[in-house]
Image: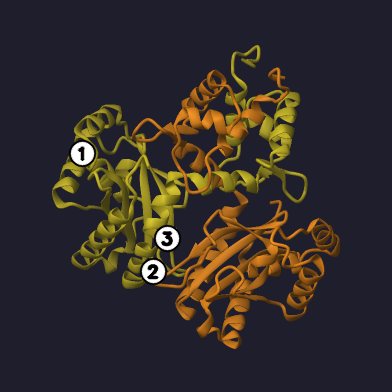
Chain colours: A orange, B yellow
Amino acid sequence: MANSSSGDSVVDRVVRILEAFPEGVSALPLGEVAARADLPLTSAHRLVAQLAEHRLLEQAPGGKLQLGLRLWELVNRNSPILLLRQAALPFMDDIHQVLNQNVNLAVLQVDDVLFVERLSRRGSVANRAKVAGRMPVHISSAGVALMAGQPRSVQNAYLERFRDPTGRVDADHVRRLLATAAERGYAELAGVVDPDTWGIAVPIEDRQRRTVAAIGVVVPIAEVRIHQIVPALRTAARGIGRQLATPGT
Amino acid sequence: MANSSSGDSVVDRVVRILEAFPEGVSALPLGEVAARADLPLTSAHRLVAQLAEHRLLEQAPGGKLQLGLRLWELVNRNSPILLLRQAALPFMDDIHQVLNQNVNLAVLQVDDVLFVERLSRRGSVANRAKVAGRMPVHISSAGVALMAGQPRSVQNAYLERFRDPTGRVDADHVRRLLATAAERGYAELAGVVDPDTWGIAVPIEDRQRRTVAAIGVVVPIAEVRIHQIVPALRTAARGIGRQLATPGT
C-alpha cells in the first residue's frame, strides 16, 4: 500500500520526516527536512502539508518547520514513560534536595540508555544526560545498572554485539562491570563521560521484579560519598517501584 | 497519494491510530485501536505493523499495543517544548521550594491551555493540571494569563467562539477576566476547578515580549498569600523569559 517506486511506504517516509530534526535543532527549512529525510521536495512538501493539517508539524517564526505541539501532547499524555516519570518525580525531588546534585531517570533502549527525566541545579556539575538523550550502556552508570538487571540472554546478546568505537574497552571488561554492578546492587563509573564527575545509579524494579529503569546521580568527584548516596538512591528506587502500576493494564 | 476509498490519506490514518490512545490509557488491544481509529481491522493491522517496525508503537506485556519509546524519544528530544521546559525547570523548582506548592508550566493551544510541566509535592493539594493535560482557557488561571497576553485579534476571535458548556459564564464575563489579568499582570481563579484551591498564574514573555507560556501555582484556599506569591512568580517568569532562546533559530 502506498509504496513509492523506491519501495518505501508512507509510514517509512513520515518516520524519516520526524527523524529529520537532529537533537537540539528544533526548527528546519522544508528543503533541509526533505534532504535529511531523503525525499524529493515535492513529496516532502505534500507529506509535511498533511502532517501540518493535523498539527503534528507546525511553522516556527521565520517559516521553518518544527514538530507540532499536538504531537508533543499525543505522545506525552499516553506514553508509558509518563507513568514512570510521574511515579519517579517526587522521589527524584527528594534525592535532589537531600544530596543537592543532578538526578537522572533512565530506561534501556537496546544498547543505549535513554534518559527520560532529569533534575539539575543551576551551578551543579556538568551532566551530559539530557532529557530524551542517549548514551551507550557501558559509559553510563545508569546503563550499567539497567543492563546488569536484565536476563542473562539479553546481556549475552548485548555483549556479543558490543564494539567500543574508541577501542579502549572490550566485551570482557563490560561483562565484569555488569557482574560487579549486579553483585553490589549499584553501578558507579568515575570520569568516563566527564573527568570531574562520578555517576552512581541503582536499578528500579517493577512489581514483577523486572529491572525497568534506573535512578542515578552525577556528583563532583571530590564530593563522592558512596555510603550516603547509595542508600538514598536505593530508598528512592524502592519507592518508585512501589508506585509503578502493574504493566499491561 | 495513497488515499483509501474513504478519501483519507495514510497520514490521516496514522494520526487516528496515535490519537486512539485516550489520556491515561497507555495500552490497548489491536481491535480497540482499530475501532477507535475508525479503521478496518486489516488496515489497522498493516499500519500498526509498519509503525511497530520503526518502534513508534510497541507491544506492552500482555500483547496490548502502546506508543513506543522511539516515538517518545523523537518528540521529546526535538520539540520546542523541550527548550521551554529546560529554561523553566530550575525556576519552577525555586518556586516549589520557596512556596512549597504545586507549580505548573502551560502554553496556549487554540482555546485550551496545555500543561507542559508540573512539579507537585506528595501531600500537596489536588491539582488537576496533568502534564500533557488540557483545560479550557477560562477556568484556568494559566489560561487566563496566557490569553490576556495575546494580541487583541486573537482574543477577539477566541471570545467570538466562546461557549461555556455549563452555561454559567458568557463571553463578557471572560472578557472582563482577561482585562483584569492584563491590567494586574497576573490571573487568579478561586474555586473554579476545585473548591478548595486557588490558582494564580503570570505570563512568561520571550525576548520579543510575546506571551509564550505561563507559570502558576495551585494553593489551598486558606493559604493564599497573593502578595507573596505574585512577586515570586513574576521573578521566575522573568528568569525563564531571559533563558528562552530567540525563537526560529
At label 3, the amino acid type is: Ala
At label 2, the amino acid type is: Arg
Q: Please, what secondary structure does the residue beneath circle 2 have?
A: loop
At label 1, the amino acid type is: His
Name the residue carrying label 2.
Answer: A122
Name the residue carrying label 1.
Answer: B173
* For residue A15, side relative to residue B197 (left or right): right
Question: Marks 1 and 2: which is nearer the front?
Answer: 2
* For residue A88, side relative to residue B138 (left or right): right
Relative depth, front residue between B195 and A52:
A52
Image coordinates of residue B22 in percent, x first then y, are 57, 41
Q: Is residue A104 above or below residue A9?
A: below
Residue A205 is at least partly visible in this image: no
Image coordinates of residue A22 in percent, x first then y, are 53, 44
Q: Please, what secondary structure does the residue beneath circle 1 have?
A: helix
Quadrant of image for the C terminus of chain B = top left
Residue B185 is at least partly visible in this image: yes
- Say which label, 1 or 3, has the lower sequence index: 3
**Label 1 packing within 10 angstroms: few (<14), some (14-19), many (20+):** few
Q: CA distance from mark 1 to mark 3?
A: 26 Å
Residue depicted at 72% across the width and 67% down the height: A168
**Label 3 packing within 10 angstroms: few (<14), some (14-19), many (20+):** some
Relative depth, front residue between A24 and B235:
A24
Judge if badges 1 and 3 mark residues of a common chain. yes
* For residue B221, side relative to residue A19 (left or right): left
Q: Please, what secondary structure does the residue beneath circle 3 have?
A: loop
Q: CA distance from mark 1 to mark 2?
A: 42 Å
